[in-house]
Image: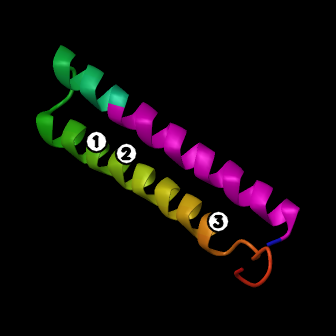
Amino acid sequence: MADAEIRVQKRRADRAALGGVVLMGLALLVSSLGWAPPLLTTAAAILGGGLLMYAVHLGWMMFVNRESDGPPS
């Protein structure tokens, strides 16, 4: 993978991870204050978890698709 492509994927993974954590945190806060129905906050938390899993997937793909350093010794 080229350096520019790695930077783009890392930025995308960082955004997805931060968005997922923020969404889950907001769902927890809204749920504890009782500002929204439980179904809505549960859906938001599930979506945040999905974003976090997507970020882990992107990070794993960066690790797997990196160029090898040469033949094993």
Can you identify the residue that label 3 sits on?
Answer: 62
Can you identify the residue that label 1 sits on?
Answer: 45
In the displayed structure, 33 sits above or below 22; it is above
- The magenta region covers 2-24
Between the C-alphas of marks 3 and 1, the distance is: 26 Å
Foreground mark, 3 or 1, reads: 3
Between the C-alphas of marks 2 and 1, the distance is: 5 Å
In the displayed structure, 73 sits above or below 36; it is below
In the displayed structure, 36 sits above or below 13; it is above
| Chain-order first, disc 3 or disc 1 | 1
* Residue 68 place in picture, x, y as percent: 75, 76
Q: Residues within 10 Å of mark 3 (few under 14, many from 20)?
A: some
Magenta region includes residue 20: yes
| Chain-order first, disc 2 or disc 3 | 2
Nearest the viewer among 55 and 69 is 69
Between the C-alphas of marks 2 and 3, the distance is: 21 Å
* Residue 20 place in picture, x, y as percent: 44, 42
The outermost residue toward the bottom is 71
Q: Residues within 10 Å of mark 2 (few under 14, many from 20)?
A: many
At x 85%, y 69%, the residue is 2
Under circle 2, the secondary element is: helix
Can you identify the residue that label 2 sits on?
Answer: 48
At x 13%, y 35%, the residue is 38
Under circle 1, the secondary element is: helix
